[in-house]
Amino acid sequence: MREILIISGKGGTGKTSLTAAFAHISANKIICDLDVDTPDLHLLLQPDHEKEVEFHAGNEAKIDPAGCISCGICEDMCRYNAIHQENDTFVVDPIRCEGCKVCVTFCPEQTISFPEKHCGTWYVSSTRFGTMVHAQLFPGEENSGRLVSLLKNEAKKLAKEKNIDCILSDGAPGIGCPVISSLSGTNFVVLVTEPTPSGRHDLERVAALCEHFRLRAGVIVNKADLNVDETEKIERFCRGKEYPLLAKLPHDSLVTEAMVKGVAVTELGESAIGTEIRQAWEQIEKLAG
Ligand code: SF4
Ligand code: SF4
């Protein structure tokens, strides 16, 4: 099983457009959107949901007003100020509740329940490029790393069932918990960057993460012609780290056209950038083994 992950260290580098193009040109694979906080691969792949499952993680306090005697103990004990009085009873603000369970333990009437928290939804969908596993975490919810692990396991299970030997994943931006979780078990990481000082800085950070986990990686510089000096600095960085430079893609309005149409750039017929993306994918497939 080959697990190929596309990440960038920052948003806005064209990572998702590239993932959509790779999803279009690659043969058998399960597609996975591991950006569970702000997913956007679905905008290009327009998935039809076949399976929809609630994601529950952590717990939150809920007061049953019928049993509440308005003693105020829970409000006094909640160090997160998540409980306040409303008329004759007390209520929990679910945004502030950290799930510490103190109020549940000390309520003299045992009228505070502690159910699992519904944090989002995950899906198995069909797309014109194959099966896709993806999710949406509710705004402000935590446990994104856990949801990423769940999606990865689901993708592996589906790949086994369908006799597919490749999982192609679009990772989250940054170097936080969901990205760290998405790196687990990955065979090859594609680092997408842009030729700006911040793009290079974020590339260095995400490359350090790959090094830490001893993962093989290659680099794609997007819009490489917009800043030749910065592109050269990125090339030097790649040589120093012995990262293969998979492609230096030019700025091309065709990518924007594809985004506006909600398709992968490689679906718009033969093009110079399409050819370079296909060549990059051939290298990735070889390097992923
Ligand atoms: S501790 Fe229990 S009974 Fe007292 S105010 Fe809170 S919920 Fe109501
Ligand atoms: S579980 Fe903890 S954080 Fe949540 S309302 Fe109760 S005391 Fe406050």
Image: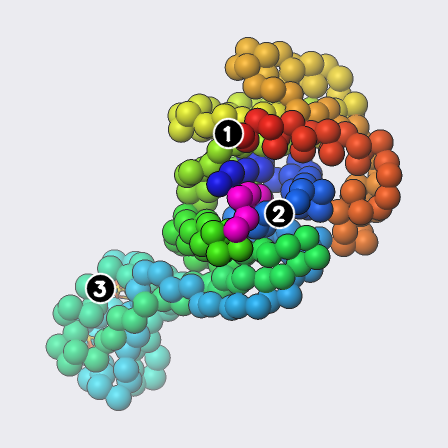
Q: Is residue 165 magenta?
A: yes
When the figure is inspected, residue 168 is found, relative to residue 192, above or below; the finding is: below
Q: For mark 3, does the 10 Å Cα neighbourhood hold few (<14), some (14 to 19), or many (20 or more) residues?
A: some
Q: Position of residue 59 (x, y in %)?
A: 30, 64
* Residue type marked 2: Asn
Q: Position of residue 211 (x, y in %)?
A: 44, 23
Q: For mark 2, does the 10 Å Cα neighbourhood hold few (<14), some (14 to 19), or many (20 or more) residues?
A: some
Element at badge 1?
A: helix
In the image, is 194 to the left or to the right of 36? right
Q: Residue at x 24, y 59 (%)?
A: 100
Give the residues in magenta: 163-170
Q: Where is residue 50 in the image (x, y as percent from the top left)?
A: 57, 68
- Residue 65: image quadrant is bottom left
Element at badge 2?
A: loop
Magenta stretch, main secondary structure, is strand
* Residue type marked 1: Val
> Would residue 199 be seen by someone viewing this image from the given angle?
no
- Cα distance in 3D space between marks 3 and 2: 47 Å
When the figure is inspected, residue 60 is found, relative to residue 182, above or below; the finding is: below
* Residue type marked 3: Lys
**Mark seen at residue 28:** 2
Label 1 beta carbon less than 8 Å to ligand 2: no
Label 3 beta carbon less than 8 Å to ligand 2: yes
Element at badge 3?
A: loop
Q: Mark 3 points at which residue?
A: 101
Q: In which quarter of the image is ligand 2?
A: bottom left
Instruction: Please state which of the two labelled residues, at mark 1 or mark 3, is closer to the viewer.
Output: 1
Q: Residue at x 22, y 83 (%)?
A: 68
Instruction: Please state which of the two labelled residues, at mark 3 or mark 2, is closer to the viewer.
Output: 2
